[in-house]
Image (cartoon, rainbow, N blue to C red):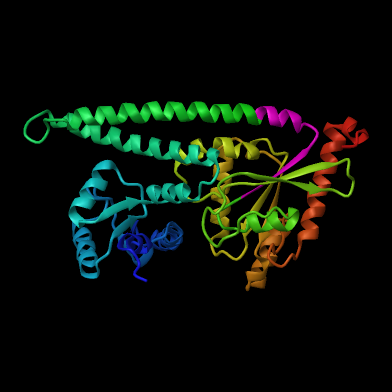
Amino acid sequence: MRVPEAVQQQEKKERALLVGFATSSQDRWREMDSLEELEQLARTAGAEVFEKILQIREKPDPSYLLGRGKVQEIRRIVETFGLDLVIVNRELSPSQHRNLEAAIGVKVIDRTELILDIFAQHARTAEAKIQVELAQLEYRLSKLVGRGTELSRLGGGIGTRGPGEKKLEIDRRRIEDRIAFLRRKLRDIERTRALQRKRRQHIFKVSLVGYTNTGKSTLMNQLTRAGVLVEDQLFATLDAVTRVLYHPDRRIRIVLSDTVGFIENLPHHLVASFRATLGVVQEADLLAHVVDVSHPRLEERMAVVEQVLEEIGVARKPRIVVFNKLDLLLETGLLERLRERYPDSVFVSALTGEGLDTLLARIYHHAERYFARQYPEAREVRP
């Protein structure tokens, strides 16, 4: 049976070249690590990664970000190997984006656009779809505003007349109207959440937070049998999932929530748009910060998570640091150093179940203290 050409084109993966930019040789290794993460992001989005290249340059070129010679080199690679896409590991200005596409001859996207695309693919619920669309529109609006400023500076003449500027203004108004509509819908969702929170006053709320792909969903499934999607992909979970976590004393009621993972240079549009989902983090009584103990830059990733928690106003909440993926740890010396540096942390393997009893005991201890202090009357009422 002959496969229709349209289906063949749909199944074909875009072949991508990944481009990094570092300002010094010292910054090179950090950027190489970031390019590894960009490769994971690209594969998650459905691209086939051809190669990764890095330019070290003291200052970014205002027109292209990259040097002109590097841009020509990229064009030759794209033409020689028939690539479809170039992904730049920085956020590009409107002019840089346009100039690179014109010079290279294929579609160029930046890191932010790639993350937004992944979020769009993984959005399942109506709420997640609203949040992703809002983030995409706000990002697109920022690009339109930039282009609009450039066009207005041209001051008329050949190439500046016609519908271009007028169409830009129409696009901007449509986007702004849509953004206002989506924000109203999210405010409605937040009001509904506020009512739900009132009904959960006598429940101890625990939220799993952490860098993306640290095993939060696997941990959630192990602790609550939640059936949360588990994939070796970044941002597999976008919607907050909440399940009951049973305490031996049935009068102590606990819920556990799994949330969207964080990432380095997470676009601010996404943080703002996902405030409704991140509301479960804001209302939590205890945060469990899940860390991939096998990752070579684990402390840098922990700092990224701390920065996002600070941004959403929950940095002072009680927390347990949970070092996960113990089954992948090869360096035993690292374990001792982490235990010394984070004495109140817990070491677990969500995959094998190792250490989960210790983690549960810690959560139960926090819940018991919380109920005794905050809601002594709840101890007398059976659910």
Q: Which residues are magenta?
A: 194-209
Residue 114, position in %: x, y? 40, 51
Horizontal placement of 258 versus 238: left or right?
Answer: right
Is residue 371 shown above or below 365? above
Quarter of the image with the N terminus is bottom left
Residue 202 shown in magenta: yes
On screen, residue 57 above or below 375: below
Image position, residue 199 (x, y; %)? 75, 30
Which quadrant would residue 192 be assigned to in this image? top right
Q: Quadrant location of the C terminus?
A: top right
**Residue 23 seen in the current view:** no
Residue 350 left/right relative to 371:
left
Please indicate whether residue 31 sits to the left or right of residue 342 in the image: left
Which of 316/366 is in front? Answer: 366
Residue at position x 63%, y 73% in the image: 330
Given residues 235 and 317, the one toward you in this image is: 235
Task: Name which residue lies at 68% across and 65% down.
Answer: 351
List x then y, in percent, for residue 329: 64, 70
